[in-house]
């Protein structure tokens, strides 16, 4: 048995060990509480509201079982380290969380890889975009647990491109369970992303979840600007400014651009 499979099996056993709630509910509560715990380290604005939701969920469980959720997160993190893939999507199907009546199925890994290879077929174009802007963007309008974005990031890594610096993904799903799963996996894999709970067709949004990699990479600023300062466009901007300003004023302007 592979190390990743061992951790995934351990996670499943922990979920099934709570006998007074159906496994699919325990799984969903785990994903939401773990997502909230990660989000609260990044999103100060929504921390209080999400923390209140966390407390409502954890109180559904006996005190002797509450520590299990920390153990579940540890197993997931170790599984993703050994096998960075859509682990939660597969587990969601196993515990009976999918909804065939609404057409809710999660993309098989093989399909994600094929679509990723087609998207990244022109690697020269991808490299030129990164050189010009410093990063590329990816949009996933019906993200599920984030399988497509994970496959895309891993393919970039195979091409020698650091996805933690040169990729930003925006994901949307109408199902909050999918949002929590995608956000949790992308956060643990340190993929810069924002995961939106909303409807792609109506453009209605309920909440946004920012990964730590998004915050640490200052992608909020980079996306508004359209490029990073260490890209060709950024170097051109700084060069143009330095030709008209003294060192002190240039330093102040750079600080302002970094802040946003």
Image (cartoon, helix red, strand yellow):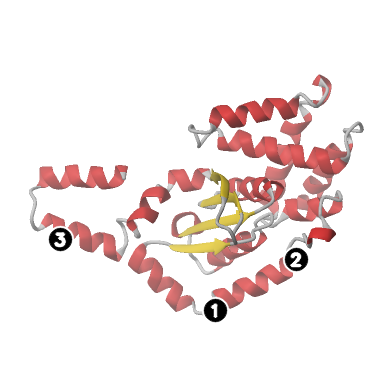
Q: Is residue 255 left or right of residue 169?
A: left
* Residue 206: numbered disc: none
Rate crowding at label 3 as few (under 14), some (14 to 19) or many (20 or more) other CA atoms within 10 Å: few
Q: What residue is drawn where x is 56% and y is 61%?
A: 153
Q: Are marks 1 and 2 in contact (CB under 8 Å)?
A: no
Foreground of the two, 102 or 254: 102
* Residue 108: numbered disc: 2
Foreground of the two, 176 or 188: 176
How far across and down, in percent of the image, does residue 186 sit?
A: 60, 50
Q: How far apart, in angstroms, are the residues tagged by discs 1 and 2?
A: 20 Å
- Point out the tag, 1 or 2, that comes first from the N-terminus: 2
- In this rendering, is residue 56 above or below 88? above
- Point out the tag, 1 or 3, that comes first from the N-terminus: 1
Say what secondary structure mark 3 lies in: helix
Q: Is residue 39 visible?
A: yes
- In this rendering, is residue 112 above or below 259? below
Rate crowding at label 2 as few (under 14), some (14 to 19) or many (20 or more) other CA atoms within 10 Å: few
Q: What residue is drawn where x is 22% and y is 63%?
A: 236
Q: Is residue 154 left or right of residue 244?
A: right
Foreground of the two, 88 or 144: 144
Q: Are marks 3 and 2 in contact (CB under 8 Å)?
A: no
Q: What residue is drawn where x is 58% and y is 67%?
A: 155
Image quarter where the N terminus lies is: bottom right
How far across and down, in percent of the image, does residue 116 sit?
A: 61, 71
Q: Is residue 1 visible?
A: no
Q: What residue is drawn where x is 11% and y is 46%?
A: 247
How far across and down, in percent of the image, does residue 4 sit?
A: 75, 51
* Residue 240: numbered disc: 3
* Residue 121: numbered disc: 1
Say what secondary structure mark 2 lies in: loop
Q: Which of the 4 image quadrants contains residue 72?
A: top right
Q: Are marks 1 and 3 in contact (CB under 8 Å)?
A: no
């Amino acid at each position: 048995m592979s190390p990743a499979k061992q951790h995934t099996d351990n996670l499943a056993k922990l979920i099934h060990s709570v006998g007074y709630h159906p496994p699919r509910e325990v799984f969903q509560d785990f994903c939401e509480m773990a997502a909230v715990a990660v989000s609260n380290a990044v999103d100060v604005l929504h921390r209080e509201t999400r923390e209140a939701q966390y407390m409502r969920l954890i109180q559904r469980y006996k005190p002797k079982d509450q520590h299990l959720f920390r153990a579940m997160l540890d197993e997931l993190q170790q599984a993703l380290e050994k096998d960075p893939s859509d682990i939660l999507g597969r587990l969601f199907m196993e515990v009976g969380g999918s909804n065939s009546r609404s057409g809710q199925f999660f993309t098989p890994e093989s399909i994600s890889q094929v679509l990723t290879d087609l998207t990244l077929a022109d690697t020269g174009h991808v490299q030129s975009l990164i050189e010009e802007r410093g990063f590329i963007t990816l949009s996933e309008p019906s993200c599920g647990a984030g399988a497509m974005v994970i496959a895309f990031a891993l393919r970039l890594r195979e091409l020698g491109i650091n996805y933690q610096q040169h990729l930003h993904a925006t994901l949307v799903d109408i199902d909050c369970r999918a949002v929590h799963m995608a956000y949790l996996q992308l956060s643990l894999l340190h993929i810069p992303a924002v995961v939106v709970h909303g409807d792609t067709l109506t453009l209605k949004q309920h909440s946004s979840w920012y990964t730590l990699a998004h915050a640490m990479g200052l992608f909020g600023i980079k996306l508004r600007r359209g490029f990073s300062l260490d890209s060709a466009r950024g170097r051109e901007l700084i060069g143009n400014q330095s030709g008209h300003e003294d060192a002190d004023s240039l330093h102040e302007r750079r600080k302002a651009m970094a802040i946003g």
